[in-house]
Image (spheres, grey):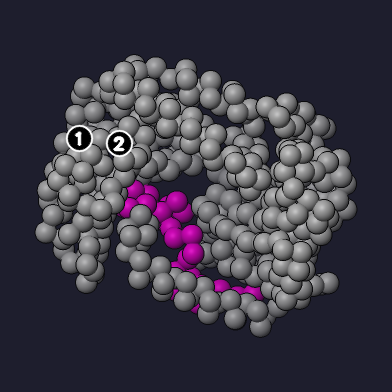
Amino acid sequence: MALDLRDGGSTVRRTVLPSGLRVLTEAIPSMRSVSFGIWVAVGSRDEPDGLGGVSHFLEHLLFKGTNKRTALDISAQIEAVGGETNAFTTKEYTCYYARVLDEDMPLAIDVMCDLVADSVLEAADVETERGVILEEIAMHDDEPGDEVHDVFAEAIYGDHPLGRLVSGTEDTISPMSRGQIFDFYRSRYTASSIVVAAAGNLDHDVVVDLVSQALFDGNGVPAPLRPTLAVPTRPADTVIRVKDTEQAHLVLGAPGIARLDERRFALGVLNNVLGGGMSSRLFQEIREKRGLAYSVYSYSGQYADSGLFAVYAGCAPGKVDEVLELTRAELAAVAEKGLTEAELARGKGMAKGGHVLGLEDTGSRMSRLAKGELLYGDVLAVDDLLSRVDAVTLDEVNVLAADLLTRDMSLAAIGPL
């Protein structure tokens, strides 16, 4: 099954193999590179109790060797042609990707498909990477500006998997066995749970042919379904972690909207005006006018069935009360009075510019294809995406603000408080 879409000067094509594996490409003849990614619809929210962090652990281990390549072979073969590889794990998906010259695309496909489909997960490598991940967890604990967002997620979701650390904790990583990781690998990394995406100077049919030969060879075992029940959230709470830091790190926010909510375009505009840049209300009030914080911004996190909206600020410990008071006042003002027409126009311009300028390289275009297919079930042409932003009305944004910004809010704080 195939689907073709003209998108400006490029061509987007989609093919579903008999196994259920989906392949999407964007042919951009003017480029001399290709970015190739394998996206697996499994992340930390899909992990069983007691196996917190297994998705991230597995991400590390797949680069340690296959039946035909050592760990050195994997990195050396790509680097020998000037390419690069990497991977990352989120709460809802895991991605493995490579970027190479267009002429080296067959090599990149072969290497990346090999490590995703045929990793051996040697026991010795499990022990080595266990130590690496425990160090990574410890390093994260030394970065309060990052840690505070995890504390906030836990304050909202509690024991639900969306409230857990993607990396897991020392208590879950230390006892995790090779057998548990391997069973998770084989049960979750199936053809139907995988989207392959590539962008650059390529031929779609060639990509499909190479992938169909290298990845899973017809393994059509369905992946376990993610529960579709509503995600429970905790009552508003304040969670403070006392640490001897120079700054206090604050996140104030509440449950937001889910990823497929039609209000997501209005939310993007609202977020831009409220705390999305140097011209935003929060930046102007807290940093520019009063110099109370170096960094202050708002953000949204959207999942299949839930979401978050929050404000972050890093400030001197003695300024916490003032920063929180100003933040709450600005949220209340927007909820009560809404945005102006000028702010709506600026918020739309920021959203459209961000979308287009973020597609200036093959890696970002590859990611757009995969996320559209994996998360939204559709790949919007750029012009269609911009039209959705243009269609947002002032009333839609203000109604959303009145709902979202008046919800009971939780506060996460780290510092000498």
For marks 2 and 1, the one nearer the N-term is 2
Position of 242 relative to 31 (above/below): below
Mark 1 lies on residue:
330
The residue at the point 42 percent across, 32 percent down is 350
Residue 279, numbered label: 2
The answer to whether 195 appears left or right of 403 in the picture is right
The residue at the point 68 percent across, 67 percent down is 62
Q: Name the amino acid type tagged 1.
A: Glu
The residue at the point 73 percent across, 27 percent down is 5
- Front residue of 74/149: it is 74
Magenta-tinted stretch: 152-178
Q: Could you tell me residue 22's position as x and y percent?
A: 75, 42
Q: Quadrant of residue 356?
A: top right
Q: How many marks on residues? A: 2
SS class, disc 1: helix
- Front residue of 254/334: it is 334
The quarter of the rendered structure image containing the N terminus is top right
Mark 2 to mark 1: distance in Å?
14 Å
Residue 359 visible = yes
Q: Residues within 10 Å of mark 2 (few under 14, many from 20)?
A: some
